[in-house]
């Protein structure tokens, strides 16, 4: 989802629209088997490939498989890691006001599986801004890539962040 930049756009806008095209610093994340197993249990996933290495290998995987929605955990943890080292995560980069932030659209596109032991790199780009409802809502659009050094891009997350201004 790419929108046009409206730097002068909404006079009541909060997002820093000058960040169009900006990227977060890359953040590396090691996927741990215990975190996968805990996450799988939390979401009610009972397939043993998400908690038992032997079961995952018997199913043809190199190690425990992360459930598809585990990409959300990786994205959140990458943002925390960036902030812990003094860099801006995507939410800080675009200038989100958490008091006015609404959850917009979120999409996950998968090109490969995530496994225990993988070290993946996470990086987010600001792809656009837009006003809707006569300026009562402002949107920021981002695209996050989760990549593996050998297997390439594994997950792309596209997201819209929404400020309610009225």
Image: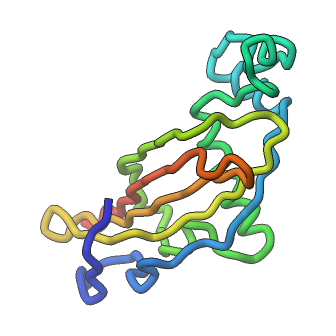
Query: Where does the image place residue 155, in percent across and percent down from the top left?
Result: 56, 46
Res 44 → quadrant: top right
Which quarter of the image is occupied by the N terminus?
Answer: bottom left
Query: Where does the image place residue 110, in percent across and percent down from the top left?
Result: 52, 39
Determine the residue positioned at 36% across, 60% down.
162
Left/right of residue 166 with respect to residue 87 in the rendered view:
left
Determine the residue positioned at 54% across, 40% down.
111
Left/right of residue 11 with respect to residue 98 in the rendered view:
left
Which quarter of the image is occupied by the C terminus?
Answer: bottom left
Query: Where does the image place residue 11, in percent across and percent down from the top left?
Result: 25, 85
Frontmost residue, 124 versus 166? 124
Q: Residue furthest bottom?
A: 8
Determine the residue positioned at 60% across, 45% down.
154
Determine the residue positioned at 60% across, 37% down.
112
Frontmost residue, 161 versus 59? 59
Figure disc tally: 0
The chosen color scheme is rainbow
Res 2 → quadrant: bottom left
């Amino acid at each position: 989802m790419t929108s046009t930049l409206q730097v002068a756009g909404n006079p009541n806008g909060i997002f820093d629209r000058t960040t169009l095209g900006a990227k977060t610093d890359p953040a590396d994340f090691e996927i741990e088997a215990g975190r996968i197993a805990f996450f799988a249990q939390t979401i009610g996933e009972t397939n043993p490939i998400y908690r038992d290495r032997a079961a995952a290998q018997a199913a043809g995987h190199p190690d425990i498989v992360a459930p598809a929605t585990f990409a959300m955990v990786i994205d959140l943890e990458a943002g925390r890691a960036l902030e812990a080292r003094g860099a801006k995560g995507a939410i800080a980069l675009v200038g989100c006001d958490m008091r006015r932030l609404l959850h917009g659209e979120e999409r996950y596109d998968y090109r490969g599986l995530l496994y225990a032991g993988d070290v993946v790199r996470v990086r987010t780009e600001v792809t656009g801004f837009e006003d809707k409802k006569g300026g009562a809502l402002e949107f920021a659009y981002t695209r996050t890539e989760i990549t593996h050094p050998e297997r390439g891009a594994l997950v792309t997350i596209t997201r819209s962040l929404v400020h309610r201004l009225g």
